[in-house]
């Protein structure tokens, strides 16, 4: 076999490396594209089907969950009414306030806007006695007359001629609720469509007006039945959950397109459809109250044409076998999706989810029914067809260009390989000979190559290699030792600096001269967040800290610092105080900027508290001195005026003026007494006390004043075990708050007083419906002598605040000029007899 020289090897290798991979890659790409062209449309269609099915199923689950919550709220409404003492006006208020939105078509069927209505949730509310006689009935927004009241113990007397809800509710015990299946008069195809062919093209015709009865017994104080309450849930609100779902690109619609298959419907646990674009598919009764038979293989042509064929999934296997399977899966509380075809022949994917609910008639399977959402299959496969066409076109173009590129590459590769091999093989032969001589011990051997390229450089390097090898080795070992020592010193210094920075209670943050974060200690991350990373811009580091970004911008632009300055940062209702310093690094900040931040919030709060205490102490001393100095002259003046008033020689006008002067002096006397009480409060007497009794005593004292003012006092007093407090001072604090609330409701209103417990605190909440407190006045209301009333000392709230401090408690206030004011007293329940 002939020996291959390096010249031949380079030619063959260069040629093969340049041409063979190109040919192989072109063939692989060609066959891959062919395979993809065959598989991609099916894969796209399968993936689109799966993704769309999962998306529809998630939406169906969400709608099912929303319906479950809606039914439970209606159930709670019935329990609330059964446990309430409601008169006719309050019952009507309940009926009016329970409302929901309905989006209906207008008379112009071509309009896509429709009309938005807010309708009562319940078609009617009825109170029925133990014999089945209706006592009170609200229907269509009014009380029906006594002549129209019926005895519903007889099914023929019910609204739909065959309902037995009275007998079923009568069997329930306290707290149990009965929920019926949907009942309503069936709407035929002709009644809905008129002369139109499809529901979406028809003007608003007859509307299905069914109800779901929700009832519970009324139990008297002796635990016996005292009648029942029955709510009739309007079917139109149930229709809102499915009527406007469009699983296509629009996501919602005024009225879905039945012929497209893109619509949703709801069926109950018996398989009956209860919401649907075709109203004649919804279960219903005839005019005599008899349930109309479902659509089946045995339905005659006349019934089908007239639309007297409500749809029941269990009987619809002849249309598609998946309908009964969906109904059975829902009864097993299972969801999923299936391929299906509707009555109109539209092939679609139908996702379904169970509506989990087990009250009343729905306890058998634990579901109210199911929600389905359908979407046409053809709309998912358009992307697959477009992808297949695009790949076919690209594949044809690839064949043509691949042949051209391969041919041109083969010619160029052959020429380049020959030139490259010739230029490399000769110098390499000379280098090989020189290396053999050097290996043999001939240190004087040199390679003489005149090439000016890399091979010439290689020859020159080869000649000097032997001379420098040992020298470089020794130098390298010495350098490695020095680098090892330097590395250890740098690590020790870095660890020392990091330890120092992490131990400082202030934040230390450094930025480069272009504003990028270079370092931040643990305190800085505590202040700014753990997500701050080296390399972030200072605008992102101080996001939400506008004043800080302004200071950093100024320092970087001006290349100077400004020492330490205070900074206040507001987070909601809390204010944090910082001491911030900016210091340039290097001359004129050429190396960046150092920011220091120290949290001064606690120190600022302590300073403000000391100033407040000093102010209150000075005010107390001043008040006591003024009160004692003024009281004696006022007493003398009052006696003189009484003497003048009693003299018979005084005219009626003079007596009236003297009487008014005496009244003003008495008002000043009350102010002086309040000042003395404020400046010299009595010692707090902590003893085990029932907080509820203190509140009841306070309400008893203020009841008459509230009645005169037209204020109703409502209470919700939770039983709280006795704990240590000063009952007289707490009563004084409550009297101040209750009196202010009553005075704030000049035209009458409602004052609610409630108690609760929160961890180790007892909470007292006083809520009024008065005119509220201006937002600007809220920070000052606990200051002495602050008042917006024409009369009064302005000491009531200040005294209340001090009483809560003596009890180590808190007083909080929230006010809105539109809704009123809420005061909350928080009393610790773990105090001892000494406080």
Image: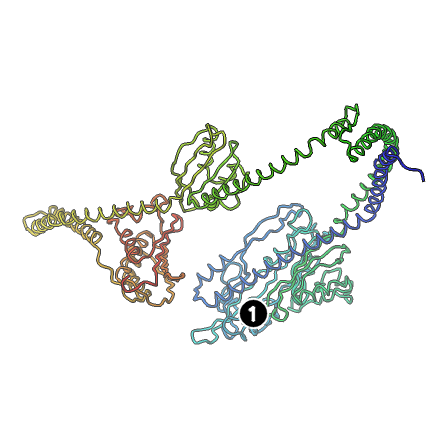
Q: Is residue 95 above or below residue 598?
A: below
Residue at the image position 40 percent from the left and 48 percent from the top? 818
Residue at the image position 61 percent from the left and 51 percent from the top? 104
Instruction: Provide residue 321's location: percent of width, then percent of height.
Output: 77, 63
Q: Label 1, secondary structure: give it.
A: strand
Q: Is residue 727 left or right of residue 31?
A: left
Q: Where, by quadrant of the figure, is residue 615 drawn?
A: top left
Q: Is residue 594 left or right of residue 209?
A: left
Q: Which residue is mark 1?
A: 178
Image quarter hosting the N terminus: top right
10 Å crowding of disc 1: few (<14), some (14-19), many (20+):
many
Image quarter hosting the C terminus: bottom left
Instruction: Provide residue 297's location: percent of width, then percent of height.
Output: 78, 66
Q: Where, by quadrant of the figure, is residue 603 drawn?
A: top left
As rendered, which of 485 and 286 lies closer to the eye?
Answer: 485
As rendered, which of 295 and 219 lies closer to the eye?
Answer: 219
Q: Is residue 199 left or right of residue 681?
A: right
Total numbered circles: 1
Instruction: Provide residue 716's location: percent of width, then percent of height.
Output: 38, 63
Q: Residue furthest right?
A: 1
As rendered, which of 89 and 497 lies closer to the eye?
Answer: 497
């Amino acid at each position: 076999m002939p020996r291959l020289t390096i010249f031949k090897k380079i030619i063959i290798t260069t040629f093969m490396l340049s041409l063979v991979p190109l040919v192989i890659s072109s063939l692989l790409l060609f066959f891959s594209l062919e395979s993809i062209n065959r598989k991609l449309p099916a894969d796209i269609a399968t993936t689109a089907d799966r993704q769309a099915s999962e998306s529809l199923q998630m939406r169906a689950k969400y709608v099912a969950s929303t319906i479950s919550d809606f039914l439970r709220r209606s159930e709670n409404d019935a329990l609330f009414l059964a446990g309430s003492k409601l008169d006719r006006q309050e019952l009507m208020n309940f009926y009016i306030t329970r409302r929901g939105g309905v989006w209906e078509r207008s008379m112009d069927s071509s309009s896509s806007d429709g009309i938005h209505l807010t309708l009562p949730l319940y078609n009617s509310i009825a109170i029925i006695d133990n014999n089945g006689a209706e006592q009170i009935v609200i229907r269509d927004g009014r009380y029906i007359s006594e002549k129209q009241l019926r005895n519903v113990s007889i099914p023929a007397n019910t609204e739909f001629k065959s309902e037995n809800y009275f007998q079923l509710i009568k069997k329930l015990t306290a707290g149990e609720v009965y929920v019926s299946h949907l009942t309503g008069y069936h709407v035929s195809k002709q009644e809905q469509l008129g002369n139109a062919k499809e529901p979406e093209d028809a003007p608003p015709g007859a509307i299905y007006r069914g109800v779901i009865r929700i009832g519970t017994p009324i139990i008297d104080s002796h635990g016996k039945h005292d009648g029942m309450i029955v709510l009739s849930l309007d079917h139109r609100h149930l229709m809102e959950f499915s009527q406007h779902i469009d699983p296509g690109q629009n996501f919602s619609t005024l009225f879905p397109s039945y012929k497209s298959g893109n619509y949703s419907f709801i069926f109950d646990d018996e398989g009956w459809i209860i919401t649907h674009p075709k109203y004649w598919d919804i279960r219903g009764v005839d005019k005599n109250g008899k349930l109309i038979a479902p659509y089946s293989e045995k339905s005659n042509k006349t019934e089908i044409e007239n639309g007297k064929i409500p749809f029941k999934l269990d009987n619809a296997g002849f249309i598609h076998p998946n309908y009964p399977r969906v109904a059975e899966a829902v009864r097993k509380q299972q969801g999923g999706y299936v391929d299906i075809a509707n009555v109109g022949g539209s092939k679609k994917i139908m996702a379904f989810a169970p509506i989990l609910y087990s009250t009343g008639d729905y306890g058998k399977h634990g579901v109210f029914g199911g929600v389905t959402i359908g979407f046409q299959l053809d709309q998912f496969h358009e992307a697959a067809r477009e992808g297949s066409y695009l790949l076919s076109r690209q594949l044809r173009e690839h064949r043509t260009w691949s042949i051209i590129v391969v041919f041109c590459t083969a010619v160029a590769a052959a020429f380049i390989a020959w030139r490259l091999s010739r230029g490399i093989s000769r110098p390499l032969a000379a280098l090989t000979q020189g290396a053999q001589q050097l290996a043999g011990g001939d240190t004087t051997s040199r390679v003489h190559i005149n090439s000016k390229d890399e091979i010439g450089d290689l020859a020159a390097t080869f000649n000097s290699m032997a001379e420098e090898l040992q020298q470089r080795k020794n130098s390298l070992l010495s350098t490695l030792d020095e680098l090892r020592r330097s590395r250890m010193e740098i690590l020790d210094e870095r660890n020392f600096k990091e330890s120092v920075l992490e131990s400082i209670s202030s934040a230390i943050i450094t930025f480069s001269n272009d504003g990028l974060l270079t370092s931040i200690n643990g305190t800085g991350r505590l202040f700014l967040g753990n997500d701050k990373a080296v390399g972030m811009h200072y605008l992102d580091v101080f996001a939400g800290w506008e004043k800080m970004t302004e200071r950093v911008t100024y320092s970087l632009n001006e290349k100077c610092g400004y020492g330490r300055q205070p900074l206040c940062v507001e987070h909601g209702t809390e204010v944090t105080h910082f001491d911030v310093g900016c210091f340039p690094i290097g001359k004129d900040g050429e190396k960046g900027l150092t920011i220091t931040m120290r949290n001064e919030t606690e120190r600022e709060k302590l300073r403000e508290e000391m100033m407040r205490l000093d102010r209150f102490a000075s005010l107390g001393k001043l008040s006591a001195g003024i009160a004692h100095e003024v009281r004696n002259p006022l007493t003398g003046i009052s006696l003189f005026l009484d003497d003048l008033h009693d003299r018979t020689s005084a005219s009626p006008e003079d007596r009236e003026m003297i009487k008014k002067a005496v009244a003003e002096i008495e008002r000043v006397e009350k102010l002086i007494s309040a000042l003395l009480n404020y400046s010299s409060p009595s010692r707090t007497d902590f003893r085990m006390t029932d907080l509820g009794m203190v509140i009841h005593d306070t309400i008893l004292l203020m009841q008459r004043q509230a009645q005169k003012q037209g204020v109703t006092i409502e209470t919700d007093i939770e039983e709280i075990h006795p704990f240590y407090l000063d009952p007289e001072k707490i009563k004084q604090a409550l009297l101040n708050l209750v009196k202010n609330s009553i005075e704030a409701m000049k035209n009458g209103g409602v004052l609610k007083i409630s108690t609760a417990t929160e961890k180790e605190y007892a909470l007292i909440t006083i809520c009024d419906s008065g005119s509220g407190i201006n937002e600007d006045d809220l920070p000052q209301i606990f200051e002495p002598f602050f008042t917006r009333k024409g009369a009064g000392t302005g000491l009531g709230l200040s005294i209340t605040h001090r009483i809560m401090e003596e009890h180590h408690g808190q007083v909080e206030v929230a006010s809105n000029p539109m809704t009123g004011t809420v005061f909350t007293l928080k009393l610790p329940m773990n105090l001892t007899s000494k406080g």
